Each structure stands twice: as structure tokens, then as C-alpha cells.
Image (tube, rainbow, N blue to C red):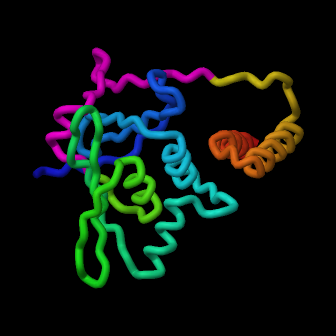
């Protein structure tokens, strides 16, 4: 079984499934991407860690990390190694006291754990051949990238007033546990600070 290392390209809402997200993995030494449909809870757990947003209370995957740390369990890697009836299967490869164990897991949970342990992600070559999507290129060989339009602000504010407004909205989003919005606001605050 040949393993290909992948990393997370991003998360987006899935137009075909209500409340689900598409998690896009990309080949580190290739040009293929692997989309995996995951639930909203797991998408939020992955996004929070990627955006370094700490929830007020630990989520399930954070709890697992805390327990693993307490018992000196190390996650070595995550492998997405099976695909049956459009369902992906993964293994969490962990080690405790020198013993290596492979634990069956849903890819979404395995990846949420991987980002907490900084564990590498792998996909078997068979899975990538079967479900991977090759990047399209334009005539010059450059990668195609979708252009995302920026939303103009409804009211034009001074940079200081806009920063205050965004900070207030960020605090409100965190209080309401709306972490996707909090991540978006945090990025907007960072852009505003870097431009001034």
C-alpha cells in the first residue's frame, strides 16, 4: 500500500447536502485534490483548530487530546485507506509505551484529531486514483484559481471606527460560539491592521 501525504486545502459548504461541508485535501507532491463530505460539527472542530480559535470549553476532539497527553499517547499519523459505497474510512495510528495501534475512525474525526497533534495526513494511492480530482490548468500551465469577490462594507467607516466595530462583532461571535464568523472577523481585523 503506497501512501501519499496530503494536507488540508480548505473547507466549504457542500451545495448537495444540507448542513454538510466539503473538506478538500491536496497532494503535497502531486496535483490532485480529494474532496470529502463531512458534518458541520467536525468541520467546525477542524476550522477552529486551523484558525487557532480556542473555544470556552473543550470540544470532543480537544478532550481526546487532553486525555491522550495525560496518558502519554502519541498520534503518529492518519491514513485514509478505504472507500466503500462513497464512504471513506480512516485509521488513527497511535503509539503508547512503544506499542503502535491502528484505530478505525471516520476521516472527519481522524483529521480533527490530526490537526490537534500536528500529525501528518496520508491517503492511499488507490483512494487518490479512485476519488481524487486532478487540478485543471490554463493554456500557459498556470493553475486556475477561482476569484472570490470581496464584499464592500455597507457604510464606509474610518479605519479606527471599522476596527472597533469588527472587534465588537468578534467578541459577540465568540460569546455566541459562532466560530466560523469569529474566524472570518479575525482575518478581516488582521487585514485591516496590516493595511494601516
101 displayed left or right of 11:
left
Nearer to me, 92 or 185: 92
Q: Please tell me in which quadrant of the rendered image residue 100 appears.
A: bottom left
24 is higher (above) or lower (below) than 124? above
Asked if residue 25 can be seen in this view, the reply is yes
- Residue that extends furthest to the bottom in the rendered view of this protein: 97
Residue 131 falls inside the magenta stretch: yes
- Residue that extends furthest to the front in the rendered view of this protein: 85
Q: Which residues are magenta?
A: 122-149
**Residue 18: x %, y % from top left:** 52, 27
183 is higher (above) or lower (below) than 85? below
- Residue that extends furthest to the left in the rendered view of this protein: 1
Residue 65 falls inside the magenta stretch: no
**Residue 84: x %, y % from top left:** 22, 37
- Residue that extends furthest to the top in the rendered view of this protein: 139
Give the residue displayed 49% in from the left and 60% down from the top: 61
31 displayed left or right of 11:
left
Give the residue displayed 63% in from the left and 41% down from the top: 180
Give the residue displayed 25% in from the left and 70% down from the top: 101
Amino acid at each position: 500500500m503506497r501512501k501519499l501525504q496530503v494536507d488540508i486545502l480548505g473547507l466549504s459548504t457542500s451545495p448537495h447536502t444540507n448542513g454538510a461541508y466539503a473538506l478538500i485535501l491536496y497532494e503535497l507532491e502531486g496535483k490532485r485534490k480529494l474532496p470529502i463530505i463531512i458534518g458541520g460539527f467536525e468541520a467546525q472542530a477542524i476550522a477552529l483548530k486551523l484558525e487557532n480559535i480556542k473555544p470556552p470549553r473543550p470540544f470532543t476532539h480537544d478532550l481526546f487530546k487532553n486525555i491522550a497527553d495525560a496518558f502519554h499517547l502519541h498520534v503518529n499519523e492518519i491514513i485514509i485507506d478505504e472507500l466503500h459505497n462513497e464512504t471513506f474510512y480512516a485509521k488513527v495510528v497511535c503509539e503508547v509505551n512503544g506499542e503502535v495501534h491502528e484505530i478505525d475512525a471516520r476521516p472527519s474525526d481522524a483529521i480533527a484529531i490530526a490537526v490537534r497533534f500536528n500529525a501528518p495526513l496520508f491517503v492511499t494511492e488507490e483512494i487518490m486514483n479512485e476519488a481524487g480530482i486532478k487540478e485543471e490548468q490554463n493554456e500557459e500551465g498556470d493553475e486556475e484559481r477561482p476569484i472570490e469577490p470581496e464584499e464592500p462594507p455597507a457604510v464606509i467607516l474610518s479605519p479606527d471606527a471599522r476596527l472597533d466595530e469588527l472587534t465588537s462583532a468578534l467578541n459577540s461571535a465568540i460569546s455566541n460560539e459562532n466560530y466560523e464568523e469569529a474566524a472570518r472577523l479575525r482575518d478581516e481585523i488582521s487585514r485591516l491592521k496590516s493595511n494601516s
